[in-house]
């Protein structure tokens, strides 16, 4: 929690972690609706009766509960989650109320919500975060980086949808690779702002992590012409970290409007192994058919039982393993050994 020059207390969403809002003074001013824009930092006052989603993910990744009247700083953006909710800052209407589309402080008006989802946090617009009479934007805090070539091998993590197990899979792969002296970097290139996903990679042993927030985006549900330079920037940032292996997660699925296909195209020539986390066996076939992507391995809820594994292998013709099963972990080590024989010992020996 921080205070502005006026003495108000603010909770900062994790989309502010690239900024200096926590360390330098700022003002808050109400701007005309026509002056609002994607990526601007804004203040919302919590309204309504709290639900289990009245949470803020702080810049360090910690989750805290908030109550009516609390002030939160986040950024305008868009979310298009297939299983939970859809919302957009551009849908905010004349009453200037909106929602926290993620706990990270991705702000917009919810336009379609799953009936299984608790009530999203409601917010009232209190103004923009300002300095020298100008609104602060996420892109204002993106440091320059030199153009450089990525030399790392890439493990590409793709999902059939959100919550398909990509982050869990990445965590376990990183854990296995850290038994070597290799330098491992974990990156989430697409999705909606949430810091704890890449922090999970760091907790598993990654030497460094980054995501699209580092490129000034609250989510990657943006036009392709906006995402492509952000993706190039992230690859330069990743290359500057000099990894031996890059664990690259494309959030959601490549068919959803988060630009996963752009990210995959940019990474393609570096990919050493593709792991598809699937919600069900038929979704594996869907991604293969619609996107032309053939994984080396399938994980996720589709592999929760031997029946699911058998159906994946029958329908898709690719191996599937349950990473929550000890035998599945041994199988993962064997797949990693085939991809990285110098880094991962042969599990069969």
Image (cartoon, helix red, strand yellow):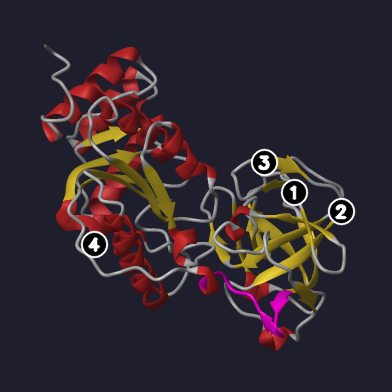
Quarter of the image with the C terminus is top left
Residue position marked by numbered label 3 in the rendering = 63
Q: Give the secondary structure at mark 3.
A: strand
* Residues at marks 2 and 3, CA–CA distance in whole angstroms: 19 Å
- In this view, the residue in front, 96 or 247, is 247
User: Going 71% across and 69% down the picture, which residue do you hit?
Assistant: 42
Tell which circle, 1 or 3, labels the residue nearer the N-terminal end: 3
Foreground mark, 1 or 2? 2
Residue 87, image quadrant: bottom right
**Relative image position of residue 221 (x, y in whole percent):** 48, 65
**Relative image position of residue 86 (x, y in whole percent):** 59, 60
Left or right: residue 98 versus residue 304 is right
Residue position marked by numbered label 2 in the rendering = 48
Residue position marked by numbered label 4 in the rendering = 265
**Relative image position of residue 108 (x, y in whole percent):** 66, 66
Kindly check if marks 3 and 4 are in contact, taking CB atoms under 8 A apart as contact: no
Decide if residue 261 is in sight here: no
Q: Residues within 10 Å of mark 1 (few under 14, many from 20)?
A: some
Tell which circle, 2 or 4, labels the residue nearer the N-terminal end: 2
Q: Residues within 10 Å of mark 4 (few under 14, many from 20)?
A: few
Tell which circle, 1 or 2, labels the residue nearer the N-terminal end: 2
Q: Give the secondary structure at mark 4.
A: helix
Span shown in magenta: 129-139
Residue position marked by numbered label 1 in the rendering = 119
């Amino acid at each position: 929690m921080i205070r502005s020059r006026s003495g108000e207390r603010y909770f900062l969403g994790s989309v502010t972690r690239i900024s200096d809002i926590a360390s330098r003074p700022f003002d808050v001013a109400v701007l005309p609706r026509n002056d609002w824009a994607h990526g601007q930092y804004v203040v919302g006052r919590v309204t309504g009766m709290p639900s289990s989603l009245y949470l803020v993910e702080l810049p360090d990744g910690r989750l805290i509960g908030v109550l009516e009247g609390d002030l939160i700083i986040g950024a305008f953006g868009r979310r298009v989650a297939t299983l939970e909710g859809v919302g957009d800052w551009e849908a905010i209407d004349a009453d200037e109320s909106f929602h926290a589309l993620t706990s990270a402080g991705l702000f917009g008006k919810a336009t379609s919500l799953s009936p299984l989802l608790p009530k999203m946090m409601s917010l009232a617009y209190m103004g923009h975060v300002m300095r020298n009479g100008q609104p602060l934007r996420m892109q204002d805090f993106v440091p320059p980086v030199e153009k450089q070539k990525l030399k790392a091998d890439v493990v590409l993590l793709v999902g059939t949808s959100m919550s398909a197990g990509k982050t869990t899979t990445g965590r376990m792969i990183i854990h296995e690779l850290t038994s070597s002296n290799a330098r491992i970097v974990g990156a989430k290139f697409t999705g909606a702002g949430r810091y704890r996903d890449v922090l999970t990679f760091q907790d598993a042993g990654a030497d460094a992590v980054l995501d699209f927030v580092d490129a000034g985006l609250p989510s990657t549900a943006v036009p392709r012409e906006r995402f492509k330079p952000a993706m190039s920037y992230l690859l330069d940032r990743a290359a500057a970290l000099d990894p031996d292996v890059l664990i690259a997660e494309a959030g959601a699925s490549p068919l959803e409007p988060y630009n996963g296909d752009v990210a995959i195209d940019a990474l393609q020539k570096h990919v050493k192994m593709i792991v598809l986390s699937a919600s069900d066996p038929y979704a594996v076939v869907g991604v293969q058919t619609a996107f032309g992507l053939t994984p080396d391995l399938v994980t996720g809820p589709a592999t929760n039982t031997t029946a699911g594994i058998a159906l994946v292998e029958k329908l898709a013709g690719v191996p599937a393993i349950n990473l929550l099963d000890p035998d599945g972990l041994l199988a993962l080590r064997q797949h990693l050994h085939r991809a990285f024989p110098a880094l991962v010992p042969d599990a069969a020996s």
